[in-house]
Image: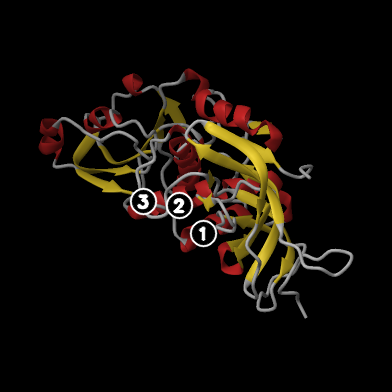
């Protein structure tokens, strides 16, 4: 029978599970420290985390203090919703076995600290329905499944994108998803020269170099509120702009160009479980590659420096923390 209680000492006394975790005590104040974990139940799994990713969208806002207030928001908190690890213990009602490598989209398992989104830790207690088994060969690339699911969600929201604004990891994944799903290769805009390379099966250019003005669907993943005016000028009549970035400042645009084109604006919210399943299937089939997107890796003990690099270095597409040697 699978164990429902996990931790014990040699003498047989039960002890709380503990983990090393990234903790944001307040904006700009980040450390790694040991935390108690909530006890697992019969429908939970305990995951020993191998790698976790740093999000330059939501985690940047948590780090900078610019995240809008929402239920459960507050400090101190453990960030992170991109983790890969192995199940070490499974509750009696869990069909998965210890040793299974899984993707974890965050956790809320810390006694005294909020889990927002709770995945940046050496060990997690997670409901089994919140993890998904992944191919062994993905290794650290598995942390990209959350962004791949975000790309799938934005792609499926409206018509296939002909233009993608931003060639960071999400923009690259969106372009790769379009190609993987058989759509025409989109054009991708990027203003940072350091991020213009790496295109596979599609083209990248600076917006000023693009003379096309009949895009029927554009997806913005830049997170830059001022990008809308430029996009509108290249949109076809009754074209649509999907906002798939996260915007810390109000989004605005000049009304006359949008009015003349009778443009529509849609907002892509967070990915759903079916998006994650579709992304995982695309990766498993070989249609969608996650190669070449992780550019930086750090030990969690160097997390303060790693987070600054992830947020401030344009050459850093994706920073991950390697938890495998963390005691």
Q: Nearer the viewer, residue 99 or 47?
A: 47
Q: Which residue is mark 1?
A: 278
Seen in the picture, residue 129 relative to 299 is either above or below; the reply is: below
Seen in the picture, residue 319 relative to 127 is either above or below; the reply is: above
- Labelled pair 2, 3 in contact (Cβ < 8 Å): no
Note whether residue 138 is visible. Answer: no
SS category of the residue bearing label 1: helix
- Residue 281 location in percent, x, y? 57, 59
Q: Nearer the viewer, residue 187 or 245?
A: 245
Q: Nearer the viewer, mark 2 or mark 3?
A: 3
- Residue 199 location in percent, x, y? 52, 31
Give the numbered dot on residue 152.
2
SS category of the residue bearing label 2: helix
- View extreme (right): residue: 10
Q: Residue placed at 66% from the left, 66% from the top?
A: 39
- Asked whether, in this view, residue 162 is left or right of residue 304, the answer is left
- Asked whether, in this view, residue 249 is left or right of residue 1, the answer is left
Callout count:
3
- Residue 230 location in percent, x, y? 26, 27
- Labelled pair 1, 2 in contact (Cβ < 8 Å): yes
Looking at the image, tell me whether mark 2 or mark 3 is earlier in sequence order.
3
Q: Which residue is mark 3?
A: 70
């Amino acid at each position: 029978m699978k164990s429902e209680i996990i931790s014990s000492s040699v003498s047989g006394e039960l002890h709380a599970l503990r983990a090393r975790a990234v903790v944001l005590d307040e904006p700009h104040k980040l450390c790694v420290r040991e935390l108690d974990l909530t006890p697992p139940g019969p429908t939970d799994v305990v995951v020993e985390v191998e790698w976790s990713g740093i999000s330059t969208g939501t985690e940047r806002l948590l780090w900078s203090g610019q995240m809008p207030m929402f239920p459960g928001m507050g400090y101190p908190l453990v960030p992170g919703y991109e983790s890969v690890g192995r199940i070490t213990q499974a509750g009696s009602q869990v069909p998965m076995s210890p040793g299974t490598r899984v993707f974890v989209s965050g956790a809320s398992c810390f006694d005294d600290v909020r889990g927002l989104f709770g995945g940046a830790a050496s060990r997690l207690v997670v409901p089994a329905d919140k993890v998904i088994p992944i191919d062994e060969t993905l290794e650290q690339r598995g942390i990209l499944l959350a962004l791949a699911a975000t790309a799938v969600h934005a792609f499926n929201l409206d018509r296939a994108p002909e233009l993608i604004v931003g060639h960071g990891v999400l923009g690259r994944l969106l372009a790769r998803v379009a190609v993987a799903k058989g759509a025409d290769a989109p054009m991708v805009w990027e203003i940072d020269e350091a991020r213009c390379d790496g295109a596979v099966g599609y083209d990248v250019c600076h917006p000023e170099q693009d003379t096309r003005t009949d895009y029927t669907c554009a997806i913005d993943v830049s997170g830059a509120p001022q990008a809308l005016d430029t996009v509108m000028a290249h949109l076809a009549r009754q074209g649509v702009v999907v906002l798939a970035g996260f915007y810390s400042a109000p989004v605005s645009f000049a009304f006359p160009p949008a009015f003349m084109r009778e443009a529509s604006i849609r907002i892509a919210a967070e990915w759903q479980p079916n998006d994650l399943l579709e992304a995982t299937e695309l990766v498993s089939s070989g249609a969608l590659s996650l190669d070449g997107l992780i550019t930086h890796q750090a030990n969690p003990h160097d997390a303060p420096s790693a987070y600054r690099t992830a947020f401030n270095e344009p050459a850093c597409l994706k920073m991950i923390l390697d938890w495998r040697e963390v005691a």
